[in-house]
């Protein structure tokens, strides 16, 4: 599926507008003229300007439809896989605190890989390896704690 550039530009400008509006709610830094909202505001302003330029430059082209569907949209299995990615992301967001990162990430990866046709004997070992690698990167390298959930009793 591909959107006309006018639609993409309008969406970018709208995203920039929301970003600028939200960044204005950030509290100022005491004693500094530059606060935490400066860079999101600059990025949002850039999205507004360049999104509007793209939208207006392509809006005059009436030959191209607003949305063009690729071949995969006509295949029900591909549409199901597409929807499954979003459903899996929602599942992760809603359950990661309760189940914990390890359980949720292994389920997240396993469900997608099974749907995408990865060999079954590879799914669980690779999902475990990837989950451990991501946890190591966040927990040890970046010092970002991930929720333990059900495994809180064995947290290291």
Image (tube, rainbow, N blue to C red):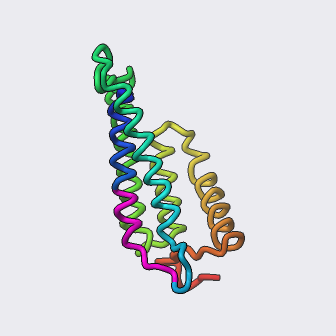
Closest to the observer, 151 or 12: 12
Q: Quarter of the image holding residue 27?
A: bottom left
Q: Residue at x 71, y 70 (%)?
A: 141
Q: Which residues are magenta?
A: 18-29
Q: Is residue 26 magenta?
A: yes
Q: Exactly how many numbered labels are in the figure?
A: 0
29 over 75 or under it: above or below: below
Position of 126 relative to 75 (above/below): below
Identified at 39% across, 51% down, the residue is 16
Point 39% across, 59% down: residue: 20
Q: Is residue 134 left or right of residue 4?
A: right
Is 133 situated left or right of 103 in this image? right
x, y percentage for residue 136?
A: 68, 68
Residue sitting farthest toward the right: 141
The quadrant of the picture occupied by the C terminus is bottom right
Which quarter of the picture shows residue 59?
top left
């Amino acid at each position: 599926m591909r959107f006309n550039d006018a639609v993409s530009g309008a969406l970018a400008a709208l995203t920039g507008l929301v970003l600028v509006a939200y960044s204005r709610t950030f509290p100022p830094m005491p004693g500094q003229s530059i606060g935490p909202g400066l860079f999101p505001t600059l990025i949002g302003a850039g999205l507004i300007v360049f999104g509007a330029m793209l939208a207006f430059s392509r809006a005059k082209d009436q030959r191209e439809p607003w949305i063009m569907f690729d071949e995969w949209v006509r295949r029900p299995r591909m549409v199901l896989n597409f929807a499954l990615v979003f459903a899996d992301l929602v599942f992760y967001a809603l359950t990661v605190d309760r189940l914990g990162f390890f359980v949720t990430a292994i389920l997240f990866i396993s469900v997608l890989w099974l749907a995408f046709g990865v060999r079954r004997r590879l799914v669980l070992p690779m999902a475990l390896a990837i989950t451990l690698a991501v946890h190591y990167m966040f927990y040890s390298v970046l010092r970002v704690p991930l929720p333990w959930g059900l495994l809180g009793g064995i947290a290291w």
